[in-house]
Each structure stands twice: as C-alpha cells, then as structure tokens.
Image (cartoon, rainbow, N blue to C red):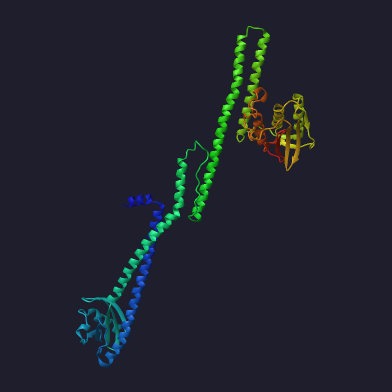
Amino acid sequence: MIGRLRRAYRAMRLGTRLALGLAVLSLTVFAVVGTALTTYMRDYLAAQLDTQLAQGQIAQSKSVADHGTLSGKKYYSWFYAVYDVTDGKAVLRTPEDPADLPDDVDDFTALARTQAGAHREVLRTARLRGAGEYRLRACEVEPGVVLVSAAPLDGIEDTVGRLVTLQAVTFGLALVALVALGRGMLRRGLKPLSDMAHTARDITSHDLTDSARLPVRHDRRGGGAEVEELRTAFNTMLEHIDDSLAVRAEAEQRLRRFVADASHELRTPLMSVRGYADLFQYAAANAPEERERHLARLRAEAARMGVLLDDLLLLARLDAADVETPLRPVEADLVELAGQAADAFRATRPGHPLTVAPGPASVPLRLDPQRIRQVLDNLLTNAAVHTPPGTPVSLAVSVADGTARVEVTDAGPGIPPADRERVFDRFYRVDKARSRDRGGSGLGLAVARSLVAAHGGRITVTGGPGRTRFTVTLPLSARSYEPVT
C-alpha cells in the first residue's frame, strides 16, 4: 500500500506535489491553531465558571451562617449541599428542595471531607450519575459547616463544541480555497518550466542535420528570480549548442569541400602520370630523346603531386598543433628574413620589379625562420602569379603597437570584395579559369595563414582595384614553442 502511494506520488506533476505539500502544511497549522484556541477557550470558560462558583458561594455562605439555609440564593441547574463535618465525618443536612441534590451525592460527601481537612476552597470536576459533567466547589462556611456547590459543564462543552465546529468548517473552507488558489498560483508560477520543457521538445523534434541553427528560444519571462535565472541559463545553453552546431556544420562543410578539392587536385597529376606512363611504355622502343621527354614530364607531375601532399600534410599538422606543432622556433631577425625573401623573388621573378620600403634595421623575434620565410615567399609568389608582367611589388617591415608587421603590396588588378574573405580558404582561386600550372594548387595562402596563426599572429588582405595588400602581424612578445621531435 505504501509502495503504491509512493509510486503515485512520484508520478504526480511538480505543481500537484507542491499543492499537496501546501495542503498538509496548512492542515497542520490549522490543527495546531485550532487545538490551541480550543484549549484556551475551554480553560477560559472553566476559569469563568470557577469565579462564578466562588462569587455565588460568598452570598450563599453568609445566608447559611445567618439563617442556616440558602434562603433562595440559588442558580438554575446548580446543585447545593450543606454538610456538618465532625471528626472527619460529613453529615448531609436535609436540603430545602429535593432538586438541590443529584441522585448520587458520594462526590459531594467526599469533597466536603476533603475541604474540612484542607481548610481551603477545593475544586473538582466529576461526572454525576444521571446529571452529567459538573464542576464542584467546596468552601467552609464556619467551623464544622461546609457548603458544596456544583455547576454544570454542559454550557462550556456546548460552547467548545460550537467553536470546534466553526473552526472545522472555517479551516476546511480556508484549506480548500488555499489549495485551489495555491494550485493556480503554482501552475502559473511553474508555467515557465513547462514552456522550457516544450522548448526542449521542439529541440528534439528539430532535424539538426539540415541546419546548424536551433530556431527555438525561451523568451517568455515570469516565475520569479529563480525561474528567470533558469531561463537565462537555458537560453545560454541553447546559444552554446547553437554555436557548437554552427562550428560543427561549418567544419563538416569545409571537410567535404576539402576532400572534394583535394581529390580533384590529386586526380589531375595522377592522370598525367598515368598518361605519360602509357606514352612511355608505348614509346619505349622509340628514340631516347622522346623517352627522356616523357620521363621529365613524369618527374614534374610527381614533384607537383609531392608539393601538394607536403602542403596538405603541413596543414594537417597545423590543425593538430595541440598534439604536435610543426614549428622549430629560434631567435631570428624578421628584417633579415624579409631581405632574403626579396632577393629570392628578384632572382626568380625578374619581370616584377620589387621595392623594399625603408624600415627598422632589425626586428628580433622568436619564430621558425623557415616557416616565416615560406609565408613571405608564398605572398610574393602570389603577387607575381596573379598580376600581369611588369606589375610593381613592394615589401615593407614595420613595428607598431607591440607587433611586427610585414606588408606585401602589388599594383595589380586587385581582388574583388566578394573574394577577399575566401582567399585564405584551401583550394580557393579568385580566377576560376586560371590553369593549375600557373595558378598553383590554391593552398599557398591557406598555408600562410595557418603558419602565421601558429606563431600567434594573423594575416589580412585589403585593397581595391589597382592595389592588393597582404599584412602579416606577429606579436613582439616572446613565445615559447616546443620544437618538433
């Protein structure tokens, strides 16, 4: 039975549980208040009756002492008895009226003997046979004479009974109203929790595979500070889930695009290798010059595929920098690295005049010189590949706001604004018609950005028609990098 009640209680809603708890608490309070009030009222009425008995016996005792009788000084429904007490024996005097005595006077006689020995007023409550509950009081009129008066308690019991009935009805109605109103208030106060549960069900029914955004929020207010705090935490959690889903969706989209682009980029040199291998097999008996030409093409395609794979491996290691960093940082001079990159560019790209802007004589930093040099070479090569011959290119090194900056600027056609945000994406090309032989694999800027980010810096692109500027920003504060083992 108790187990079923427990299971039924656990199956109830929170509002019902609270309403029942409120009802039990209210019932307990009402019971305590009613008991205290009833007890107080009973004692008060009994004290009043004792006082009335005492006041009545004062006049009656005088009448008994003067005339030997009560002389009519009686109260309706009271009993009276006069005893002569000698040597512990109480002898009842003949009453003026037989109705003055109950059917059983044993309690009167015992009280008279007790009072004679106590020499003080004695009070007692007794149930008289055939009469009911009475309050008895004995007083000594004069030595050897004791007056015993008895007043009925049915008036007190009737009053107390009415009080109990009134309390039961009033408290019952108050309890019903309290439970009903409390249930309504609890329902209204807990409605935000129900709304949150409804919002959670909306989330579970939302297909997260189609969209990375959760189109639900709990915007309804109310319910108090605690519920408001829960609502804020709930919405914060949804924002966090929203952001996490967006990041995951973006990462999955980049991964799919990366796999597709990598497969496409690798397929071209592989097809070339296969084609030249077939040609080499077909022309194996031909002139040595033709075989050498085919072998040269095979080596070129293999080298191109090796560069692409190296870039992919480097990007993968940069993405997993928390596990293994590809950097080998040492103390190096950024100005010296920029000069070396400028000399190499002039030697390999004589058709693009390069200007090195004046700047600081030395900018010592803790960095990986090989990787920073790779970044600078990629930017300079990008400026040469994507601009017409004869386009001037400039290189500048500066220090400002606690950072070292390297700027590579060209006076080419510029990058459309719609493409500037994506030029650092992997395998992305501004000119979609550009051949891979001239335009590269589309990984140069992605590698450059990842390498700069691994050094704690950033790379940005600005400009418009007639100018494009790539800016590499590195922190001057020394950073410790674990060398690759």
Determine whether 453 is above or below 26 in the image.
above
* Drawn side of residue 444 relative to residue 113, left or right: right
Residue 144 pos. (x, y %): 27, 88
Residue 120 seen by the camera? no
In the picture, the quarter occupied by the C terminus is top right
Determine whether 481 is above or below 41 in the image.
above
Q: Nearer the viewer, residue 274 or 151?
A: 274
Residue 262 pos. (x, y %): 59, 26
Q: Residue at x 55, y 39 (%)?
A: 246
Q: Nearer the viewer, residue 437 or 160?
A: 437
Which quadrant of the structure image shows residue 464?
top right
Instruction: Tally the numbered discs.
Output: 0
Determine whether 373 is above or below 42 in the image.
above
* Drawn side of residue 149 relative to residue 171, left or right: left
Determine whether 362 is above or below 59 in the image.
above
Residue 453 pos. (x, y %): 66, 36
- The residue lying furthest to the bottom in this view is 66
Residue 295 seen by the camera? yes
Residue 254 pos. (x, y %): 57, 32
Q: Residue at x 63, y 27 (%)?
A: 432
Which quadrant of the structure image shows residue 150?
bottom left
